[in-house]
Image (cartoon, coloured by chain):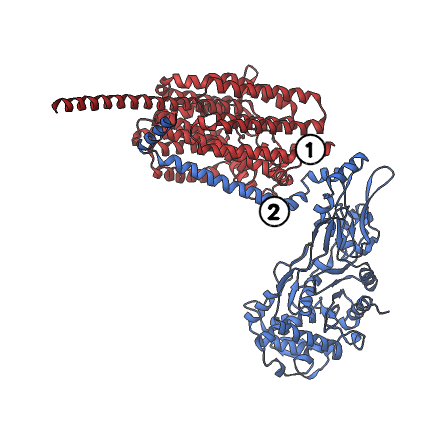
């Protein structure tokens, strides 16, 4: 009986996630929220269906009642988040909210299986992030003054990551965290947000060569500090966001190629200078030849991804714990192993569809400042996803960043939720722009009609 | 409402142009992700078996905790390896035939070898139905792993083992029409039942025994006169029409500068054509042929016959070595032509060349695994009947078959003459030590010559001439196969 349940659940999970994701892409063809009602209903059904089937699998394999309460609690929290959001922000992009919840749910399910304790901690962080997150769209909508603090954002960001470089604790060879009042922070995550606001503020009006040079210098300082902290993933992320935003602000692809060329050159130099980069590249080229040391993580990750097959070994059916740091850097491998390659691929497509929706908002909004922030969020999100999944599957060298919204990590999850909420605030602004246009057009039409009538009247009089 | 939306749409189109940069970036990342996901799906599927066999992969242990290792069976269903649970509940791998199948079936501990190694993935996985699994669960039993049916014949394997007795050497028996390996013996051997206990002793053994080495696939031997097959093929390539006009007068030796090639035991063969040179295995004549063949022709033939190249084998194997180098002296060329010098061949490779001759020039992919079945007899996978590649033309294969038949009728393999079946083959007495006159005894051939069913390659180390020591072994195996005696 137990076996039947877990086997059937495998296929149900994959099917529901597929239906969910198909709707995420389908929604791209329907830009107006009012046309998407049926899509949202279907998605919410599939979302909770996936969660339910996964927990049935977990309960069948472990038989622990505690998990049932945890599961019920999650349903309550996620359902109320979605409902509240629909009520408070009816004009926001609810598809991205759905995707965010779906990815958070998948993360919690996988964490419950890997480490119940970590799952609970993650869940608490998620709940707090939501509470904070509810205010953010409204704040973004109202605080137009943000545009003025450009250089202050940069200064705060650099200070934050600078302090870590000097005082931070070295964990796994990188200095990325420090503790305040018993809570460990990873400032490079928060700095990501500040960096986006800085870039947007600096570039939304002026795009002359002098401004670009100043922005490049400040971005360079960020990147250098992160490289020195051995946080290669974040360094690369900041660099890519910088390039993307310069490109969007100027609409000149020349800058992009120039930047990429410079980046390639800098990578070669960095490769020669830093032994930890050489180790990463070596492990990437031949993970099995270096399996006892540098290649161990990557080899184990590859074993995990390949062992699941199309529909996975089922939760608790594999050995994802054999991958070091599986909860943070290799959650994708764990998902591929136990929920299957099909599931893992579809989940990645959810990430891609989220990116597309964010970029679409950036494309439609008229305010250049918010356009840059929106696109910055999109690029930062998708590039980080690319670094984690590509790194864990040997598509690119490993850099050790988390999979946004899915991986374990308090700061990472909180920052990811906040970024999505900032995006929702930008959606409100775009809606407001459209409403303004509407009013202006109405007024123009009224005036036009007025003159037209008047002229007609005069005409008649003359006649 | 509808009206309002329409006006919205029209105004959107009239807005100032949007940055194309956002579209470019979105399309770029979409393609990047598509490429990555295709890569992940493809590489994880293709490498699945390889990864699970990696010793650092703990999933092997999970599978073994869940499934009992499957059985390895002969072509007729005899159990060659199985797992039994002893009284204490400990699983023990049993090999009922002991040493007989040591190298080919291999062992499942100490790093694995043979069929146990390359069929490991199937042996530790199970393909039984869900319902079956449920019934095993209710009995609190492990699931049975999938069984591997090999192409091996217990009868032929036994004959080969006995025929080689205590000598060092190897025998490979295949079916040239299908590529099935019927028997494979390498001596000295070991008992896979006690391999864990004996392991250290084998590793510390510094003698030439090398019990763990599968000489049939990993052993590289000077091919001696069996290599005249290769030289003949090169000559046929250059003289497709007039090869029958070849003549040579053997005076027991031929000299070129400081280098002298002698015939076996200095025998003078007199006046010879190509067939007779081959049948009598005349070194002088073949040295002469070797000098006449162009370097490019020779190297092309070597390439076609897979020398210095990968072989279609699942086993651990050594690549054969043979090359007509650019600055070779005439003496070295003569050595090459008669299979001496730096040339080295594995018995399995020699068998593949012979099998291709027997099968009209086409090599069938050699394989030991016939079928994978679940414990409830569902077929998971079957192998066989797959062409690997054509090594020579049909006409060339026909001529070589005729030449090899004459070896039996009028030449060095006369011990196979006058039997109920017509055999064809080539002997070899390969000198492996230039200071002494010791030689490895070779025979490679097939039967019946007109419709080949069985192809055999024998090497007996340090035994003497192929005709006296290897041919009788081949005869015993042929006899057993055709049910004589």
Residue B446 in the image: x percent, y percent?
73, 69
Give me the residue at 75% from left, 50% from top.
Answer: B148
Q: Residue furthest top?
A: A181
Residue B124: assigned label: none
Q: Residue A289's image quarter?
A: top right
Callout 1: residue from which chain? A
Q: Residue B416's image quarter?
A: bottom right
What residue is pinned by disc 1? Answer: A6
Image quarter of the N terminus of chain A: top right
Give me the residue at 73% from left, 80% from top.
Answer: B267
C-alpha distance separating marks 1 and 2 = 26 Å
| Chain depicted in red | A
Q: Is residue A372 left or right of residue B482?
A: left
Give me the residue at 59% from left, 81% from top.
Answer: B242
Chain B appears what colour? blue
Judged from the image, the secondary structure of the residue bearing numbered disc 1 is helix
Q: Is residue A133 left or right of residue B134?
A: left
Q: Nearer the viewer, residue B68 or A6?
A: A6
Judged from the image, the secondary structure of the residue bearing numbered disc 2 is helix
What residue is pinned by disc 2? Answer: B46
Please say if B166 is above or below B40.
below
Q: Nearer the viewer, residue A113 or B239?
A: A113
Residue B29 in the image: x percent, y percent?
46, 38
Residue A50 in the image: x percent, y percent?
60, 29
Callout 2: residue from which chain? B
Please say if A87 is above or below A285.
above
Q: Residue A307's image quarter?
A: top right
Q: Nearer the viewer, mark 1 or mark 2?
A: 1
Image quarter of the C terminus of chain A: top left
Q: Is residue B408 left or right of residue B41?
A: right
């Amino acid at each position: 009986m137990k076996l039947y349940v877990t086997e059937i659940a495998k296929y149900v999970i994959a099917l529901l996630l597929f239906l969910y994701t198909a709707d995420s892409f389908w929604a791209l063809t329907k830009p107006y929220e009012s046309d998407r009602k049926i899509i949202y209903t279907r998605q919410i059904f599939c979302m909770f269906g996936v969660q339910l089937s996964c927990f049935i699998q977990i309960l069948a394999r472990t038989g622990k009642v505690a998990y049932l309460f945890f599961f019920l609690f999650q349903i309550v929290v996620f359902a109320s988040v979605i409902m509240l959001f629909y009520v408070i922000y009816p004009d926001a992009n609810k598809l991205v909210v759905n995707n965010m919840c779906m990815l958070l749910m998948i993360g919690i399910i996988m964490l419950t299986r890997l480490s119940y304790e970590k799952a609970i901690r993650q869940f608490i962080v998620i709940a707090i992030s939501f509470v904070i997150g509810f205010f953010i769209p409204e704040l973004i909508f109202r605080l137009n003054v943000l545009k003025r603090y450009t250089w202050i954002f940069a200064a705060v960001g650099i200070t934050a990551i600078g302090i870590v470089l000097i005082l931070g604790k070295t964990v796994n060879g990188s200095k990325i965290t420090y503790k305040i009042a018993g809570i460990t922070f990873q400032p490079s995550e928060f700095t990501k947000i500040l960096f986006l606001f800085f870039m947007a503020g600096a570039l939304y009006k002026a795009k002359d060569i002098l401004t670009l040079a100043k922005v490049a210098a400040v971005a360079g300082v960020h990147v250098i500090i992160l490289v020195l902290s051995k946080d290669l993933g974040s360094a690369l992320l900041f660099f890519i966001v910088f390039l993307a935003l310069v490109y969007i602000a100027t609409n000149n692809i020349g800058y992009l190629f120039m930047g990429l060329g410079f980046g390639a050159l800098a990578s070669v130099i960095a490769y020669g200078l830093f032994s930890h980069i050489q180790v990463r590249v070596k492990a990437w080229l031949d993970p099995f030849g270096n399996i006892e040391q540098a290649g161990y993580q990557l080899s184990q990750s590859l074993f995990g991804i390949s062992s699941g097959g199309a529909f996975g070994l089922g939760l608790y059916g594999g050995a994802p714990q054999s991958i070091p740091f599986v909860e943070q850097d290799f959650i994708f491998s764990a998902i591929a192993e136990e929920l299957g390659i099909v599931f893992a691929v579809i989940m990645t497509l959810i990430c891609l569809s989220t990116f597309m929706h964010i970029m679409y908002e950036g494309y439609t909004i008229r305010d250049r400042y918010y356009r840059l922030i929106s696109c910055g969020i999109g690029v930062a999100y998708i590039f980080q996803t690319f670094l984690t999944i590509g790194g864990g599957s040997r598509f690119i060298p490993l850099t050790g960043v988390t999979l946004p919204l899915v991986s374990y990590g308090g700061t990472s999850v909180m920052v990811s939720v906040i970024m999505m909420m900032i995006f929702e605030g930008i959606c409100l602004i775009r809606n407001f722009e459209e409403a303004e246009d509407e009013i202006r057009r109405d007024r123009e039409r009224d005036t036009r009609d007025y003159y037209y009538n008047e002229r007609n009247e005069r005409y008649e009089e003359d006649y | 409402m509808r009206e309002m939306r329409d006006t919205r749409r029209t105004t959107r189109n009239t807005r100032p142009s949007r940055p194309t940069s956002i579209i470019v970036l979105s399309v770029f990342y979409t393609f990047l992700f598509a490429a990555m996901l295709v890569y992940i799906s493809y590489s994880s599927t293709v490498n699945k078996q390889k990864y699970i066999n990696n010793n650092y992969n703990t999933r092997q242990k999970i599978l073994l905790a869940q499934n009992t290792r499957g059985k390895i069976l002969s072509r007729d269903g005899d159990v060659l390896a199985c797992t039994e649970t002893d009284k204490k509940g400990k699983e023990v791998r049993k090999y009922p035939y002991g040493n007989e199948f040591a190298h080919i079936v291999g062992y499942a501990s100490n790093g694995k070898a043979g069929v146990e190694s390359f069929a490991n993935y199937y042996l530790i996985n199970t393909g039984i139905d869900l319902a079956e699994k449920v019934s095993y669960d209710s009995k609190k039993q492990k699931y049975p792993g999938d069984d591997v049916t090999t192409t091996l014949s217990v009868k032929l394997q036994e004959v080969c083992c006995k025929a080689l007795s205590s000598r060092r050497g190897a025998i490979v028996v295949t079916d040239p029409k299908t590529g099935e390996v019927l028997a494979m013996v390498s001596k000295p051997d070991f008992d896979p039942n006690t391999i864990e206990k004996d392991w250290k002793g084998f590793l510390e053994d510094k003698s030439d025994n090398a019990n763990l080495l599968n000489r049939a696939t990993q052993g590289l031997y000077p091919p001696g006169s069996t290599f005249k097959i290769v030289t003949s093929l090169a000559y046929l390539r250059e003289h497709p029409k007039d090869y029958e006009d070849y003549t040579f007068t053997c005076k027991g030796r031929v000299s070129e500068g400081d280098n002298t090639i002698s015939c076996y035991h200095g025998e003078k063969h007199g006046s010879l054509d190509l067939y007779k040179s081959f049948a009598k295995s005349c070194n002088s004549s073949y040295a002469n042929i070797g000098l006449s063949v162009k370097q490019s022709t020779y190297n092309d033939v070597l390439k076609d016959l897979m020398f210095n190249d990968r072989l279609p084998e699942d086993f651990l194997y050594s690549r054969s070595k043979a090359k007509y180098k650019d600055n070779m002296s005439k003496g070295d060329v003569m050595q090459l032509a008669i299979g001496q010098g730096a040339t080295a061949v594995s018995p399995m490779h020699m068998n593949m060349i012979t099998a291709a001759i027997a099968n009209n020039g086409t090599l069938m992919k050699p394989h030991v695994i016939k079928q994978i079945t679940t414990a409830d007899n569902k077929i998971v996978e079957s192998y066989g009947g797959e062409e690997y590649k054509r090594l020579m033309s049909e006409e060339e294969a026909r001529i070589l078959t005729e030449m090899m038949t004459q070896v039996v009728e009028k030449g060095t393999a006369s011990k196979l003459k006058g039997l109920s079946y017509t055999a064809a083959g080539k002997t070899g007495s390969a000198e492996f030590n230039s200071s002494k006159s010791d030689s490895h005894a070779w025979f490679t051939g097939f039967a019946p010559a007109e419709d080949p069913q069985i192809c055999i390659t024998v090497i007996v180390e340090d035994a003497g001439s192929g005709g006296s020591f290897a041919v009788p072994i081949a005869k015993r195996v042929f006899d057993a196969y055709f049910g004589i005696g």
